[in-house]
Structure formats: C-alpha cells, structure tokens
Image: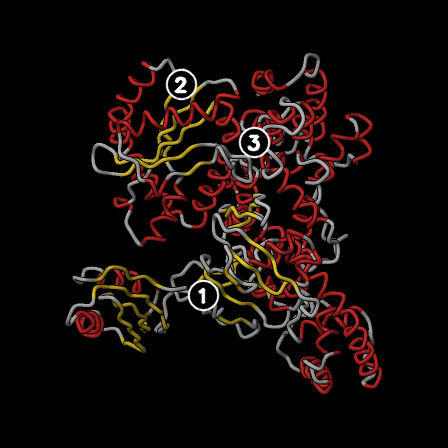
Amino acid sequence: MYRALIQKAEPYIKEGDETIIRKAFKFAVNAHKDVRRRSGEPYIYHPVAVATIVVEEIGLGTTSIVAALLHDVVEDTDYTLQDIEERFGPKVARIIDGLTKITETTSKSESIQAENFRKMLLTISEDIRVVLVKLADRLHNMRTLSSMSLDKQLKIKSETEYIYAPLAHRLGLYNIKSELEDLSLRYSNRKVYNEISEKLEETEEQRKRFTKSFVKPLEKDLKKHNFEFRIKARTKSVTSIYKKMRKQGIPFEEVFDLFAIRIIFDSPLPEEKSVCWRIYSIVTDHYTPNVKRLRDWISVPKANGYESLHTTVMGPDGHWVEVQIRSSRMDEIAEKGYAAHWKYKEGSGKGGINKERGIEQWLNEVRDILEDDKSNAIEFLDDFRSNLFNKEVFVFTPNGDLRVFPHSATVLDFAFEIHTEVGAKCLGAKINGKLVPLNHELKNGDQVEILTANKSKANEDWLKFVKTSKARKKIKDYLREDKKQVASLGREVVERKFKQMKEPFNDKTVSQLREYFGLRTELDLYFKIGNGDIDHTEIKKFREMKEENQKSPKYVPEDAKEFKQKIRQIRKEGDELVIGEDMDSVHYSIAPCCNPIAGDDIFGFITINSGIKIHRTDCPNAVSLMANYGYRIIKARWASQKDEEYDVLLYIEGTDRIGLVNDVTKMISTQLRVNIKAISIDTHSSIFKGHITLSVRDSREAEKMIAKLKEIDGIIRINREV
C-alpha cells in the first residue's frame, strides 16, 4: 500500500522527499492505531488512499502528499496543529487546519456544515491545495460510502452534489467531477444508475466496433502527414447521460452522442494551434462537419483552463460524432485541471500559457467573495456556488477588450465587473449600438457600452437577475449600508417593546423573534421593523404565541438538538420516524414543495417552529437541506399500507390529435379506475401540454398508471411532477 503510493509519487517528488513522506506515514499509522473505519478496514487505509488520489489523479507533490496522510490526525486524535507544525512545518499545518472541521460546541452558526464549507473555501486564496486534498478525501469517502447508514449516505451524497462536484469541475478536474456525480446518482437513484450502467456495458462492444471503423481512415491520413498522435474514445458519464435523457425526455437508446473521439498529438507549444486546425482539416475531409457545433477553446480557453478544438461530424452510420482535438499539454490540463495548469504556468515564464482570463481570473473573483466577511455561512455558500458556473459567454468592451461571464449574465453584471461605482449608477447599456435595460442577458460577441446616471441607485430587485458573485456582493454591500441605518431604528423599537412586555432582550429571544417572522438574519428583522414592513403590534402577537406554546401540551421545539432528543423518544424502530403510526406527540406535516405520497423514499427535516417536514429524497430542495443542515435530517419511512389516498400531479405532453385527451381520461377513469381531481390542457403548434391531478393509494400505483398511459398512441411524455 505505502510502496504503491511511493511508486506513483516518483514523477512528482524531488530526490530526498521520500524521507518526509515516510515520516508522515509512520506518524499517521501511530496516530490512528487500533482505529477502524465503518467498513472494518484499518483507518490508515483511508489517508493512504487519499494521498494516492492526490498524486495519481490530481498530480500534486510532496507537501500535499504529507498533508493527505495527516489530514484526519488533528480532527480525530489528541494531536494538535502545533504538533503538526513542529514536525512537518507551517505549510502542512495550514493545509490540515483548513481541512479540520469546526466542532458543534464551538460554532454558533445555524448550519455547522455551511460553516465548515466556508472555513475550507476561505483557504482558496491562500493555498488551493486545501481544496484539492479535500476533493481527494471526498472522492475516497464516496467510493467507500456503502458501509455507511442510509441517512449518512444521503447527507454525504447531497454535500457532494451541492458543492464538491461543481468545485471539481470549476478547477478542471473533469474525471473527479464525473465520478463524484455518478456516485451521488448511485446513492440517490440506484435504479436509474444501474439501468444506465448495464446498458452502457451491453453496448460497449458495439461502440468499440464503431470507433475502430470511424478512426481507421483518420489514422491513415494522420500518419501520412507525419503527426505523432494517439486516438481514444471517451464514453459519457452515467450522470451526463441521465441529464440528457431527462432534459430531452428520451430513452437511453435515443441518446446518440454517448461518447466522443479524442485526437491527442505531440507538438512544440508555438505550433499547437496550427496543428489543431490542420488535424481538423483532415477530419472534415473524411466526415461532414456540423458548422453550428464548432467549439474553439484553443483561441479562448474556458475559465478553468480547458483548451481543445471540438467539432461534431456526421459518422458513417448517419449519427453525429463529437471529435476533440488537443495537444498532450492540453490533455493533461483537461485531465488534472488546476494542478497541471499551474505546472505549465510556472514553466512558461512571465504570464504563463493560460492568460489572466482563465483560472487566475476566477481565483481573483473568489478572493472578492472571500473579502466579504459580513454575510452568514449560508449566504456565503450561495454566493460561492453562483461563481461555479460552467457555461460562459464572451463579450467585448467598447475598446475591444474581451470579457468572460457566466451564461445568462446581464448588463448589470458587466457594469459591476468594470467598476463598483459604474455598477451602482448603471442605468442600462448600448449593445451593438442598441439601447437595452439592466436585466438584458449578454450573448456571445456582444459589444457592451454601459450607461450611468447619478440618480440611479442599487436596489433589492437587482439581486433577482444578476448572476456573478461579484455583482451580488457589491449590491449587498450597498443595501447593507442602507439597511443598517433603518435597522438601528428597528432595534430601538424591539428593545422598547420587549421592555414594555417584560421580555428579556437577549440573543435567545431576538433569535426566536427572527424565526417567528421567518427571517434569516437579525439585520433583516430590525430592518423590516424599522421601515414598517412588520407592524409593531406583531411583536405583541409573538409574545402571545410564546405564552400559548408554554401552556399547550403539544411539543414545540426551541432548539434543533432538543427537538431531536424528543424525536428519538417516540421513534418506533431504531433511529427512524414511521409516518402513519400513532404519532400524536410529534408535530409533522407533508412538505408542499415535493408532496410525497406513500411508497416514496422520504426523510424528515426538523424545522425550528413547524415541527418535522416530510420530504421526498428527490425533492428539489433535498440536496440543499442535506448539504447545509445534515444534523437536522432524520430517517423516515411509511407505515404499512392503509386505506388512504393521495393527490399526485402528472405532467403530460402529446400530439394534438382528435380524441387523444378523451383516450387519456377514459383510460384513467374506466380501465385504471382512478379518480381525476383536476385537469388542465393547452395546445400550441399541434402539441398539447398539461397537468392532471389524480387520487392514488401509493407511488407504485402512480408508476403503474404512468406506464399504462405511455402506451396511448400520441403520448410523447408523461411523468410525475415534484
């Protein structure tokens, strides 16, 4: 195990570095002795596996290997950061500090997980290796997730989907991003994951035969022109196939671009671009290209440093095939992302290969977010995630300078990118000579001239359409200053009212008042009271509600931990909430955002004032709730079948033929004997779309009904809506 690590590390470490790596390994072995993971393996297997990923899949060196071997020592043993610094130096200690979780006892945050994310992400501007080692740690945890309990699996996969997979993509670690997404899908929808995996396996030989036939004439021509190259086929990830199936409403068999052909060549750096285009010419001599699908990432690399020339051509069997053309250097950056980019940057003199508009520009934007220490952890995480965009648009200033923005970015995003004051006073813009409003979305090739006016002032509505974290942060800064003045008046009102009601004015009661009005921060509370959005008499109603709750035998929690203790007392089986059994002492309700019915996979979410909300595990809000509030998630299941009916909403789409809607309603009412509660249908361009609300006993009946309705001639798509 250790020898395998050293063998893989040889290309990345200097002579003599093995001594410090061996020292770290022995230290970790001693620190974790007699400790085993949930899988039963000795704990030391985990840090060694993480160190191996750091080397083999990310391409980092000695400091990162040592940090990976020691990454759990401070968190899980009695050793301190000072012990680590004394033995292994300040760089390793700093990385491990960034990886060490905040304990619940030291955090006052509403979300300990969001605080931990924040702590880790704050290190990006100082040492990005913290995040890279954390991604390796998360990848190994996902690979070994099967030994965890179901609720732990859901929590960890949600964190992975919510922040780690997008972060890996943003850093150019495509392979790690794809595996994290696939493993998340495996634990959130095992049935779909297994079906797609099996079909990929069944069609593997067919893809190999097609690839051999497709590349044969290309290989012959490339050799004829004396190129040094290799060709490989890359199959799409299970998750990307699933996303395409859902987006287009098609089965696996109709996803034709299951793989891409990569042509990777060796060439001196100055000749790379010209070689790409020469190979492109050879490819298009043999196969007809789709000109709309040409993607030139060599002239303008992606923000994560990715460079490649993509074209889509018509293959010999009448199907479109994507061909990616890149140099060996470009391929290493595509595979190992940030680490490879930095390697080439350092080796290329001043300025590096990937100019400021790539990864370094993104890091500068991240530093802007990190400078904002005023937002709470949840707001910080939301802003950070908004900066993990993948699709980009390229626009120009009036002087012809190129600027890169996330897809759907607006004129206002552009204005704040130019300068904070320009953004704050932005009135609109001229795009390609035409006047457009603030919320106009930028398109590739636009030339943008910002128009300003002194009377223009930032307002809260701007936050509804800006896309970049920089714009969001600056707008919030402006609004925060305005809010502070109004909030100070609101605080005086609350303090005076509490004094009149003989209610203690402290953190606890103010927090309860904030939660009563459903607000996220104290600033929001005081602001709404200060500007009159919350009437002063409402504060008195809060006092009355508190008194009523104290008299009522119904349990209403003041604190999530206290509530969870109460839940444990009334659970029927292990650590699980059983929905439908005698639960008079538990305040729970069905979440309207996903409307679960009997048979659905569900979980409980402990709210502060509304008891437990029951959600579907595939609820649109599930990933965010589990990622940010995992400690408030409890396992739940339905009790045995009872004679109870649930409303289920179906989306239906089909060709607008005479009698089709009648066929649908007839099958539901007559053959399936299900009650139709509501129906709404609209027709446009010979296609009808609509919703039907039905009464069913459980999810199996709903699935059976959907399968039966799909058999009706003319039905294009039908599915249950969340």
Question: Which amino acid type is shown beneath numbered disc 1?
Answer: Cys
Read off the residue under disc 1: 594
Task: Say which of 536 and 220 sits in front.
Answer: 220
Counting from the top left corner in percent of width and height, residue 146 is at: 48, 41
User: Image check: 108 left or right of 240?
Assistant: right
Above or below, comparing residue 457 to residue 340 in the picture: below
Q: Tell us which disc is closer to us: 2 or 3.
A: 2
Counting from the top left corner in percent of width and height, residue 14 is at: 67, 15
- Picture quadrant where residue 233 is located: top left
User: Image check: 165 left or right of 290?
Assistant: right
Q: CA distance from mark 2 to mark 1?
A: 51 Å
Q: Tell us which disc is closer to us: 2 or 1.
A: 2
Residue 144 visible here: no
Read off the residue under disc 2: 229
Q: Earlier in the sequence, mark 2 or mark 3?
A: 3
Disc 1 and disc 3 in contact, CB within 8 angstroms: no
Question: Which amino acid type is shown beneath numbered disc 3?
Answer: Glu
Read off the residue under disc 3: 41
Q: Residue at x 67, y 66 (%)?
A: 453
Q: Tell us which disc is closer to us: 1 or 3.
A: 1
What element does badge 1 sit on?
A: loop
Task: Say which of 24 and 387 sits in front.
Answer: 387
